[in-house]
Image (cartoon, coloured by chain):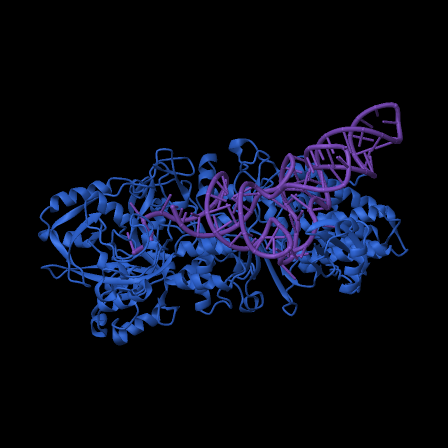
Chain colours: A blue, B purple
RNA sequence: GCCCGAGUGGCGGAACUGGUAUACGCGCACGACUUAAAAUCGUGUCUCGUAAGGGAUGUGGGUUCGACUCCCACCUCGGGCACCA
């Protein structure tokens, strides 16, 4: 066989590169840095399919070019291995998760290594390694020991808050939490018991203990995140893994106060070089809306209903007020409500229904009026009925709304059903629809008539003594799982309920090595069944899967440091990730949590940049040949091992980059991959044309144009077009008489990031001693990129009728003259009046007749 | 329902800032080499038409000397959010 032996060559160079530490990141902090990062994988039991390496290959091509351009490149890899999937896998296979993870990591590593990725493996991290999670726990403690100062718009130490309380109570301190804050003087603070103080501080801590309704899965004996559950055909909630029934249950949890950073996370997006698409998803998720909080007094009582609205201008159209069923006022007003029993019955009937029934699409709204109580519209003194209704959410805004049926679709539907008054106060728009999104001019609103909605909002808010507020859809993140396989939360509880954080010197708090890590079945973590653990008073919840992945990019900077999560020197040098590559499915999870932690660490002075990932690229999925997702279930999985074995790693790499745009999802084609192998074979055969003689001018020109194109294309992740341009170059070289050794080497260099093995092999055969991957990236010659002659298209009335070739410097007049005299043009311009001639330099002449 | 993104040959796709639509690759057809096959190489390959020409970038309009590219309306597909007041 004439073709090259990929197995032999690839094996040889993997050995050489390892031995020579070709891809090791330098410790030299004088060289300009480049941090190219892949989202680290979750090593599942199934191993890799051909879709997984797509992103890794793209970032590898980029990292390789940057290395050749002289950057000190940090391009590491590691494993994110805590969490439910590993625990489930271990349970199924009746082995310890530690063992399961180690085995899976081995499989992944073997699969990754044959692809020829240029990782510096000496910087590998693994989130389940106590040496690693020591620092996950440490960061948790920093967050636990901090609060968010709204006036300074940054996190501060909880000790500073305590001393503020000590000095002046909390009369002036900004509440960083939504719950109603108790006010106290410094004297009162000093008299508080330890437990009372703890309870107050818990309302401010950025990591806090609380209770929440969770998705409880009885069969799995665990709590699931929202993205771990799906709806079945009947609309019931079931777990994504295993398809077990999921219900709501109140449970003790730990939370992260990510909402404190809502605005920073929103504003921070503006300066990031991410796709608009992902930024938009995060913006929607954060869900900022500006509006007014207005109080409606309840007649004959001291109580008030606080509502939130973005359309204060429509207050004159309010015809009733609605409370969420969970709203506290319902109970408080018990003695005033004539039909209280009926109301309570209604509310409890809602509670027994799963939430999805309540929030399901097109669900008919229902509610019940509270007889005997009336709210007073602060704008005009009108008395309005008060309702409870399922369409008002307790956890958004104030849990109460003023209903304006004329200008809100939901209120409209409800009003029609329950025969409530509909009062139009803003002109324009279909009353039954979309009117709320339409901004017009006020009518029927007394002295505000004729005013625009925007102006009226401020005026009316002022008039009714309301205040302008900002609300977010985003909620605090639950930071606890009732599972074994996660980082222990480094806190101790004593019998009086006092919580003590572990001192740094006791970190890491290692996960106890137990035989049985199955769920308690009570909803509590398996750790609650470990006697020695409970005796010490350790927290039994563990951290969620996203804990370890929220900061790993910092650990790569200095992965072996046992004194700090990374040294000051390393952090100051590497600063942030220059290019981050991964799937877009992490838009509202990992990518948000990481930004949150990074912002926090920045506030506390531990790191240099607020934002962790400057530039983000999301690789598209590789679908199976049938156009579906690759999955064991469909039996359509293509294993990269087979491709590497049949065609070689270089072919796999070139094909995956050539298939189509990097960020687009594409189906795998078993037929097309041969084209990439042929390309590699042709390159290998071109060796025979190399001579000491100069290449032709044509080859030089095409070569330098290709160097330019490949350089710019890699920079913009347009890998498919850079390969196509190199194919064109190879086509040209094949028909050339000879190729100079100098030119051929330059071609090898620009191909090297894509096909590192074969280029290295030919490079060394040509007598080079040093690795091609350590050589300098070729520069294109500006003179050779410019043509001295150009082809100009001649159009008549916009239709192509001919073409001419002229010197680059030919003047406009000259070109027009030549064009008009051109033979193929003559029939079109003969005997007609030429009205106009448009000339685009170096491209086109359009003759308008 | 709302918010994004995308629709180009038989297939994956290319086209700079509005300037030759279909580069590059796959497939297919024919030819060369071969006893034969594979591999390789060469030629052709949007469509109608013998040709001259005409028509095509989801559909229908518009702007322009000129539109895959810009504007309006609609259709289809993919993604995100979903009673967020």
Using residue A127 as the reference point, say whether residue A417 is left or right of it: left
At which x and y percent is residue A639?
Answer: 61, 37
Name of the residue lying farthest toward the bottom: A167
On the question of residue A7 being in view, the answer is no
Residue A552 visible in this rendered orientation of the protein:
yes
| Closer-to-camera residue (A776/A412) | A412
Q: In the picture provided, is B57 more to the left or to the right than A282?
A: right
State the residue in front, A286 or A30: A286
Number of numbered discs overlaid on the protein picture: 0
Q: Position of residue A538 (x, y in %)?
A: 35, 53
Q: Quadrant of the N terminus of chain A?
A: top right
- Residue extending farthest right: A693
Q: Quadrant of residue A21 in the image?
A: bottom right
| Percent x, y of residue A146 | 37, 65
Image quadrant occupied by the C terminus of chain A: bottom right
Res B30 → quadrant: top right
Q: Quadrant of residue A64?
A: bottom right
Measured from the top left, where is residue A508 in percent x and y?
A: 45, 57
Q: Is residue A601 left or right of residue A335?
A: right
Q: Is residue A436 above or below residue A160?
A: above
A279 or A291: which is nearer to us?
Answer: A291
Q: Is residue A67 left or right of residue A46?
A: right
């Amino acid at each position: 066989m004439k073709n090259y032996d990929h197995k032999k060559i690839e094996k040889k160079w993997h050995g050489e590169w390892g031995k020579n530490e070709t891809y090791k990141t330098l410790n030299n902090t004088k060289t300009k840095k480049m941090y190219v990062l892949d989202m680290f994988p979750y090593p599942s039991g199934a191993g890799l399919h051909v879709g997984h390496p797509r992103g890794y290959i793209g970032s590898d091509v980029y990292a390789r070019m940057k290395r050749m351009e002289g950057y000190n490149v940090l391009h590491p890899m590691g494993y994110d291995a805590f969490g439910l999937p590993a625990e489930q896998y271990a349970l199924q296979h009746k082995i310890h998760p530690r063992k399961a993870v180690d085995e899976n990591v081995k499989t992944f590593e073997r699969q990754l290594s044959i692809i020829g990725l240029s990782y510096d493996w000496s910087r590998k991290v693994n989130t389940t390694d106590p040496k690693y999670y020591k620092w996950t726990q440490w960061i948790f403690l920093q967050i636990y020991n901090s609060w968010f100062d709204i006036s300074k718009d940054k996190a501060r130490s909880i000790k500073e808050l305590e001393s503020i309380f000590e000095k002046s109570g909390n009369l002036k301190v900004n509440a960083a939490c939504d719950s109603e804050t108790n006010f106290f003087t410094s004297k009162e603070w000093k008299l508080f018991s330890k437990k009372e103080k703890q309870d107050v501080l818990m309302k401010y801590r950025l990591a806090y203990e609380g209770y929440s309704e969770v998705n409880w899965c009885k069969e799995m004996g665990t709590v699931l995140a929202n993205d771990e559950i799906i709806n079945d055909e009947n609309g019931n909630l079931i777990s994504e893994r295993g398809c077990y029934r999921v219900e709501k249950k109140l449970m003790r949890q730990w939370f992260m106060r990510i909402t404190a950073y809502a605005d920073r996370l929103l504003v921070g997006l503006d300066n990031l070089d991410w796709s608009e698409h992902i930024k938009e998803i995060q913006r929607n998720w954060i869900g900022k809306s500006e509006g007014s909080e207005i109080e409606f007094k309840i007649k004959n009582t001291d109580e008030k209903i606080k509502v939130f609205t973005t359309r204060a201008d429509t207050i004159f159209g309010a015809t009733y007020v609605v409370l969420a069923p969970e709203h506290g006022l319902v109970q408080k007003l018990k003695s005033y409500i004539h039909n209280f029993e009926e109301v309570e019955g209604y509310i409890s009937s809602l509670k027994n229904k799963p939430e999805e029934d309540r929030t399901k699409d097109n669900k008919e709204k229902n509610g019940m009026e509270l007889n005997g109580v009336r709210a007073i519209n602060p704008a005009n003194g009108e008395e309005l009925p008060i309702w409870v209704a399922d369409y008002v959410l307790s956890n958004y805004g104030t849990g109460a709304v003023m209903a304006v049926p004329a200008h809100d679709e939901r209120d409209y539907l409800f009003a029609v059903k329950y025969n409530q008054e509909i009062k139009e106060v803003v002109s324009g728009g279909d009353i039954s629809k979309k009117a709320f999104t339409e901004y017009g001019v006020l009518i029927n609103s007394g002295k505000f008539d004729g005013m625009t909605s925007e102006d009226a909002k401020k005026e009316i808010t002022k008039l009714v003594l309301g205040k302008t507020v900002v609300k977010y859809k985003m909620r605090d993140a639950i930071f606890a799982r009732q599972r074994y396989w996660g980082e222990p939360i480094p806190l101790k509880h004593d019998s009086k309920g006092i919580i003590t954080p572990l001192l740094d010197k006791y970190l890491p708090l290692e996960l106890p090595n137990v035989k049985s890590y199955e769920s308690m079945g009570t909803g509590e973590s398996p750790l609650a069944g470990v006697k020695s653990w409970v005796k010490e008073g350790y927290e039994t919840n563990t951290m969620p899967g996203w804990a370890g992945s929220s900061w790993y990019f910092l650990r790569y900077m200095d992965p072996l440091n046992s004194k700090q999560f990374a040294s000051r020197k390393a952090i100051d040098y590497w600063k942030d990730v220059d290019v981050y590559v991964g799937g877009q499915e992490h838009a509202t999870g990992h990518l948000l949590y990481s930004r949150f932690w990074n912002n926090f660490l920045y506030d506390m002075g531990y790191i240099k940049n607020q934002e962790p990932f400057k530039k983000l690229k999301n690789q598209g999925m590789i679908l199976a040949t049938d156009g579906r997702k690759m999955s064991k279930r469909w039996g359509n999985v293509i294993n990269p091992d087979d491709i590497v074995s049949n065609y070689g790693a270089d072919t796999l790499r070139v094909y995956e980059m050539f298939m189509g745009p990097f960020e687009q999802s594409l189906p795998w084609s078993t037929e097309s991959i041969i084209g990439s192998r042929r390309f590699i074979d042709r390159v290998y055969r071109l060796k025979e044309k190399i001579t000491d003689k100069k290449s032709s001018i044509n080859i030089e020109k095409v070569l330098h144009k290709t160097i330019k194109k490949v350089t710019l294309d890699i920079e913009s992740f347009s890998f498919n077009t850079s390969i196509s341009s190199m194919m064109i170059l190879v086509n040209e070289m094949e028909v050339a008489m000879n190729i100079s050794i100098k030119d051929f080497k330059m071609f090898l260099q620009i191909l090297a990031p894509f096909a590192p093995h074969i280029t290295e092999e030919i490079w060394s055969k040509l007598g080079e001693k040093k690795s091609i991957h350590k050589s300098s990236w070729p520069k294109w010659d500006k003179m050779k990129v410019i043509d001295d002659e150009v082809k100009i298209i001649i159009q008549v009335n916009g239709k192509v009728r001919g073409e001419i070739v002229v010197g680059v410097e030919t003047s406009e007049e000259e070109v027009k003259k030549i064009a008009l005299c051109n033979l193929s043009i003559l029939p079109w311009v003969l005997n007609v009046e030429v009205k106009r001639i448009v000339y685009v330099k170096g491209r086109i002449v359009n003759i308008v007749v």
